[in-house]
Every structure is written in structure tokens, then in C-alpha cells.
Image: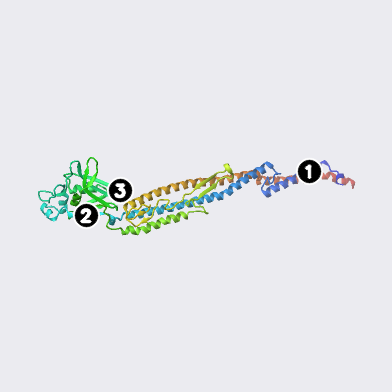
Amino acid sequence: MANDITLTSSIRSSLLSLQDTAALQATTQNHLSTGKKVASALDNPVNFFTAATLNDRSSALTGLLDGISNGVQTIQAASKGIDSITSLVKSLQSTVKQAQSDAVANRPKIAATGSFGTAAEAALTGKSQHDTALAKTLIGTAATATAASAGVVGLTAAATGSTNSVQIKAGNTTYKFDVTSTSTVRDLVDGINKSGIATAAVGDDGKLTVTGTGSDNLTIEAGTTTTATGVFAAVAGDQTALFGTADNTDVGGSGSSAVRSNLVKQFNDLRDQIDSLAKDSGFNGTNLLGGDKLSITFNEKTGGAQNKLDVQGNLLSSASLGIGKFVDSSTASSTGDFSVQNDADLTKAADALTTTLTSLRSQASTLGSNLSVVQTRQDFTKQLANVLTTGADNLTNADLNSEAANYTALQTRQSIAQQTLGLANQANQGVLQLLK
């Protein structure tokens, strides 16, 4: 039986050395083949389970990267949408400016029927009809211009406690200025031109023409102002003396601008494109310009420990931006649209578009800030997942260079042990020789 076999201590020692070396070789070979020095809990429980925890967290964070990436693309899609809408709004501004530059036909015009400087008067004064008209005094009994006298238009002097005045109205704006006993037609023209809502000129025929600076209906009246109250009252005779008619109220333009009419469709088509762009600025079913809410999770935790960013979108449309439609009308609109033939409405349109650009810049800034946060967290998550994986590998991975050197050393040890075992057996072989 095996237990009856007696081995010398040197042989047993050599055998044990060979067995230990073989076991170490097996372990080293496993390290080299798997690349792991801790392949199971049996190798090193602490390192094995710590590495497993680190790898689990790394995997969870890596799984969140897809959601973070989708969040980045969703915000970028909305940002690109705002950029394109901003370009459209600037095109709308150009359309409004083009409409504002063509308004001659829309200007209300009041033309005097009579001349302040007739050809006969010009002959008497030795001046042109234009210069003769401008030199005439306004207040006093009407008188023809002569070589010795500038002539008088014929406004009635105001009673004590009142002053002669001229009042101009256009839209919601009223302008009034006084006329003194020495005022001339030239002073009248200058006073009207200072109003900002109308311009006046005397033609070569000596006739006065007043034109509104805007498309709102124009009213110009001559009369008196009570000094104590500041109340103006039109005087029919004075108006007749200036314009040949007693009624110069609410005079509108003589026609409409064909250029402005042609711009209505262009403006409204651009406006419609804003709505279409906003609807098409979504990504993966989420549209921040459609009022959707985007939630991006940044860590693997739940409940109160979870870290996430909520981005609430805004419902963006031409209506929400305050951009009404163009309407081919000269009457000021009260519905939020803009009458293209009305200068005041065009000014409102220009102001609304300026406000729109400010709002778009604000929204773009907010999206940019959120995008910066998400991209920063995306980079951090990638780096942290790499750190966790590297930490786990450091606990379990084998140093292949070291393991290869160990394996070579073990082969040398095995060779020496085998030689030692051979030497130990030589003693027994000497006994055999004696028995022969």
C-alpha cells in the first residue's frame, strides 16, 4: 500500500517544493490568461466586492449618458429653431421698413383753394407769387399786396382774454401754436412745420398746402384760445380765409400705396413660417418651442438624492410673440393686427418686432445656459464613469509584466526542484547497487 512506502526526508522535501511550484504556476497561468488577479471572491473578497460596486455604478452612469445626450440634442434643436425664427423676424423688420418708405399716396393733404399771392399782386410788389404770399400779414382786414404794403390775409383779431391760434390734429396727437398781430404767412408755415405731424408749403402759385407726416386723418383749424382756460375754439371765417373752406376736419389720404399692398402677402407668409419653424424644432418627440418639458437625470440615485435638470419650454408662435398680421387697410387696427396703409400701425409693427427680438434673445440665452450645464454634466459623467472603471480595474487586474516574470521564475524553480529530487533519489539507487 502507498502508506507502506517510505520516502526519505530529502525526497519528500523536493516533492513538496515541486507541488508548491506547480500550484503557483497554475495560479500565475490563470492570471495571465484572464488578466485578473482577483477573478472571484475566493481570491480577495474585499477587492472583488469593492470592484463590483464600482463597476455597477460606472455602468449606471454610462446608461444615463444616452438620456443626457438626447437632452443636449433637444436643447440644441430648440436653439437652432430660435436662431432661424430670429432671422425671419429680421426679414419682417425689413418688410416693415420697406412699407414705411413708401407712403406718399397715404398722406392726407389739405390744399387752399385761393392764392395768398396772385399774379396781379406779384406784379404790384415786384416779387414772385411765392414771396408775395409768404410776406402777407395774417391778422387784420383783408388787403391786397401792393408796392407799399405786404397785404393782409384777413384773420379776425381775437377778443381781449384770447389769442389767435392754429390747431392741428393727427391721430391721437394735437399741436397748437399762437398767431400774433405781426405774424405772416411765413410764420404760419414755420409753425405748422414745427408740429411734427404735418408740413406746410406755399407753391409758386401762392397757394398754401398742408400735408400730414403720417397716414392718420388730418385736421387743421384756425381760431382763438381762451387765455384763462387754454380752450381752443375754431373760427369758421378764419379757416375760410386760410383755406377757402370752413371745414378742414378729419381729412384722409387720397389713395393707398400699391407697394404696401403688395407687401401684405410677403409679411404674412414670413409670419406663418415662424409658426412652422417652431413646430419643427423638436427632437425625439420633445419640442421646447412647443411648450414641452425636458427632464435630464444626472446621477443613478433616486428620491431626494437624485440630481436632475428640468427645462421648461415655451409655446413659441407668431401670436405669442405679439406679431399680428398685415391687413391692407388705412384704419388703425384694434385687434392686434397691423393696417399696412396706416403709419401708426406700421410703427407699432416695428416696435413689436423689436420687442420680439429681445424676447428671442432672452430665450436663446436661457437655452444656452441650460445647454452649458448639460454638456458640463455630460463630460463629468463620462470622466467619472472612467474613474470608477479604472478604480475597479486597479483592484482586480493583474500586472501582466509581473505575472510573466513570476512564471519564468517558477519554471526555473521547478527545474531546480526536479534536479534536487533526482539527487535525492541517487541515494536509493546506491542501495540497489549493493543488492545486486
Q: Position of residue 107 (x, y in %)?
A: 27, 54
| Residue 128 marker | none
Q: Which of the colour schemes (rainbow, by chain, secondary structure, one colour) is used?
A: rainbow
**Location of residue 179 (image quadrant):** top left
As drawn, is 430 to the left or to the right of 174? right
Mark 3 and 1 residues: CB-CB less than 8 Å, in contact?
A: no
Q: For the residue marked with disc 2, what is the amino acid?
A: Ala
| Residue 111 marker | 2
Q: Secondary structure at mark 1?
A: helix
| Residue 172 marker | 3
Q: Which residue is mark 1?
A: 16
Q: For the residue marked with disc 3, what is the amino acid?
A: Asn
Label 3 neighbour load within 10 Å: few <14, some 14-19, many 20+: few
Q: For the residue marked with disc 1, what is the amino acid?
A: Leu
Q: Residue at x 53, y 48 (%)?
A: 295
Q: Nearer the viewer, residue 143 or 128?
A: 143
Residue 375 visible to the viewer: no
